[in-house]
Amino acid sequence: MTDVIEGHDADPVVGTPADAPGPVDGPAEAPDPASDAATPQAPDAGFVATHPMEDDVEALFAGDTGVLPYPARRALALVLQRRYVSAAAHPTEWKALLAHQNVLTSRCHDLFVELVVDRDYEIAYKRQVREDGLSVPVLLKDEPYKRVETLLMLLARNRFRQEQGAGERTAHLDAEELVDYAAGFLAQDETNLAARRREIDNAIATLVREHVLTEVAAGRYRVEPVVEILLPVERLRELTAWLRDGGSAGAGARDDGARGEDDGDAVDEDEETDA
């Protein structure tokens, strides 16, 4: 949106009184256009001369033609590299992202990627642009969470909401809580408990790797606010109903969570979103 600057009323022109004496040297001569063109004009004191952004940016490497300052580039690269960027984990990049949000959003749009900045949770993440009638190369791949990962995310989200409701700024879970919760959904006739335990441990490691959980001490994890975004209310209701039906694949809801765009997996270069 272009800002509209309202002009001030022009200062009244002070006229020459009718009875003022005329010039003593005869009638005034017409100004010489050539003389005026040769005379440098003083710049308007109310405006600052503009210059291209690239004039302010020092090259960071040989052949560098980028126009963004170093902090903005770091913020953009981090957004593209990670599932999300948070003010808590990356305070410097978060500040740079906010300072250059418009231009970084534009850079993402050039790649058919949407930059989402949630100032309430102080989180920034990206989404693949999908528009009816528009065919674009897919950079971010949708990949569902596995069943056990989904179970642990449900527990993490519920704990996060409970602690927020109690006025706490952070929520934590112990490894024992996570294991016991997931194990409670095992089939009654399950016999390979060792394999199931490895599956649960791998699910915990996945959520840590994707920064849904952060290990703050041995066997103790902090729940990150991104869980609210990964499991919105609508999806939470769907998964809760799925659990009430036994958590089986044929229970109506999918047996995995909505992982969203996964920036860690490669996508075939010919894969495109088609209307």
Image (cartoon, rainbow, N blue to C red):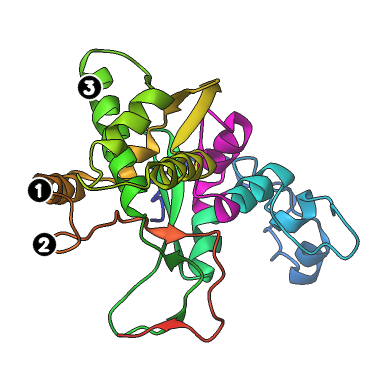
Q: Earlier in the sequence, mark 2 or mark 3?
A: 3
* Residue at the disc numbered 2: 252
Cα separation, mark 2 vs mark 3, equals 27 Å
Q: Quadrant of the N terminus?
A: bottom left
Element under disc 1: helix
- Residue at the spot 36% in from the left edge and 83% down from the top edge: 134
The residue at which mark 1 appears reads as: 241
261 part of magenta stretch: no
Q: Residue at x 67, y 46 (%)?
A: 74
Please state which amino acid type lies under the numbered disc 2.
Gly
- Residue flagged by tag 1: what amino acid is it? Ala
Q: Is residue 235 left or right of residue 109?
A: left
Q: Which part of the image, by quadrant, shows the C terminus? A: bottom left
User: Viewer-proximal residue, 222 or 193?
Assistant: 193
Q: What is the span of residues highlighted in magenta in the rendered image?
A: 79-102
46 and 64: which one is in front?
A: 64
Dots 1, 2 in contact, CB < 8 A: yes
Give the residue type that dot 3 points to. Answer: Gln
Mark 2 neighbour density, 10 Å: few (under 14) some (14–19) many (20 or more): few
The label on residue 162 is 3
Asked whether the residues under the numbered discs 1 and 3 touch, taking CB atoms below 8 Å apart as contact, a structural biologist would say no
**Residue 126 occupies quadrant:** bottom left
Q: Mark 1 to mark 3: distance in Å?
A: 19 Å
Q: Which residue is drawn at the image coordinates 35% and 39% (left, top)?
A: 227
